[in-house]
Image (tube, rainbow, N blue to C red):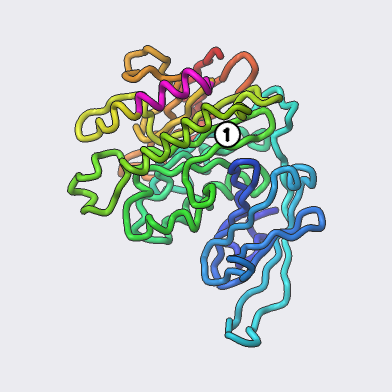
Amino acid sequence: MTDDKLPGLFASYPAVYAVGDRYQIIIPVTKESVMWVRVGGRCFYDDSNGILRSASPTHIMELPMKELDAAGSYTVCWREVNERKPYFSDLSDVYECSFSFRPISPDAKTINVYHVADAHNRVTGPVSAGSWFGDGLDLLVLNGDIPNHSGDIANFAAIHRIAGEITRGARPVIFSRGNHDTRGIYAEKLAEHTPTDGGRSYFTLRLGPLWAVVLDCAEDKPDGNAEYGHTICCHDFRLRETEFLKKVASDPENEYAAPGVRFRLCIAHNPFNETLKPPFDIEQELYGEWCRILGERVRPQLMLCGHIHRCYVTLPGGERDAKGAPCPVVVASATGGKEDREYFAGGAITLSDSGADVRFTDSRGALLSETFVDF
């Protein structure tokens, strides 16, 4: 589908986000509407306990991965709201628009992943860089700080515009929250406009032969830092997340080692294995525990991060590794200054049974560097 054929109601193409064993199809809209998707003759609604949602600028429809994977396409259905009343609301007729979808095959020998982080409201640059694989893209990772902040709800549109314009709603996307996403009056509403596990911003997921754990470091300075003005409790949040990670690691069914899993990723905005300069040197003991749990039990093959606004690969025990990284870490995001506001560089990563071919590419189509990481 071309841009000129995209329905006027849609603020961007759909984005199909992966959480657990389900997809969340998210579509930002320009007008009040009710919406659902139809897959294989079954409808999945954006509703609140049976009430179709219309007041939100973001529609979210959740469905089992296996149903969309089998169907290979989905149809978005909607009615525009002229006036919603207690009785006899005035809505339009039903409109429809269909999209193809290509899941990651369980038998895939390679997986092409593009990593975007730290867009900070940029869209054009990240989309240009993220189009490196073209139709060969298998998975897009949006790894935090995609909006510049959450002080304006309009900033959330950057998330879905980047996802939609790169994937055209036809490839799976993984979203992870960054520290800038926690800032501003609408930060508490972010979970209503982005994929979460029941409102929780950390979770695991499975896409064909790929398993991943998404972790959320939240803010990057102590909770008492004056910058936050007594509005955060991220330390307690991370303690709850640690319990989640322990549960994942001790799961007797070992979802990360289930039959068919050949690739294991850890995705987090902050490279928490590093120790940054004060006041960013937080949670030394806790982040060390995360590294230990992952390294001893889960054993991911690669960790994908942003936050540093640079592109590099660091190995366990390397110069940057202060806490015993559980695996090689790919940090992949760089932006331009005032002279080139839309410049962006990210990571084009091809996973195979032997390792990961990590290429850093930019919005000008240039290959900046290439490294092979042996699994």
* Dominant secondary structure (helix, strand or loop) of the stretch shown in magenta: helix
Single out the residue that lies furthest toward the right: 41
Placement of 90 over or under 68, stated as above or below: below
- In this rendering, is residue 192 above or below 307? below
Based on the picture, tell me whether residue 263 belongs to the magenta stretch.
no
Q: In this view, does 374 lie above or below 155?
A: above
Tell me the element at label 1: loop
Judged left or right of residue 318, residue 38 is: right
Q: Residue 77: x and y, percent?
A: 71, 65
The foreground one among 53 and 292 is: 292
Position of 292 compared to 128: left or right?
A: left
Q: What residue type is labelled 1?
A: Trp
Across and down, in percent, residue 140 comes to: 57, 38
Tell me the residue at 37%/43% (across/down).
237
The residue positioned 33% from the left and 24% from the top of the image is 274
Residue wearing tag 1 = 132
Quick one: label 1, few (<14), some, or many (20+) residues within 10 Å?
Answer: many
Q: Can residue 85 be seen in this view?
A: yes
Look at the image and give the residue range highlighted in magenta: 287-300
Foreground of the two, 124 or 210: 210
- Residue 299: in magenta span: yes
Q: Residue at x 57, y 71 (%)?
A: 54
Q: Where is residue 262 in the image (x, y as percent from the top left)?
A: 65, 22
Coordinates of residue 183 in the picture (x, y in percent): 32, 52
Q: Is residue 342 visible?
A: no
Name which residue lies at 34% across and 20% down: 323
Farthest-out residue, left: 226
Residue projecting furthest to the bottom: 87
Q: Quadrant of the C terminus?
A: top right
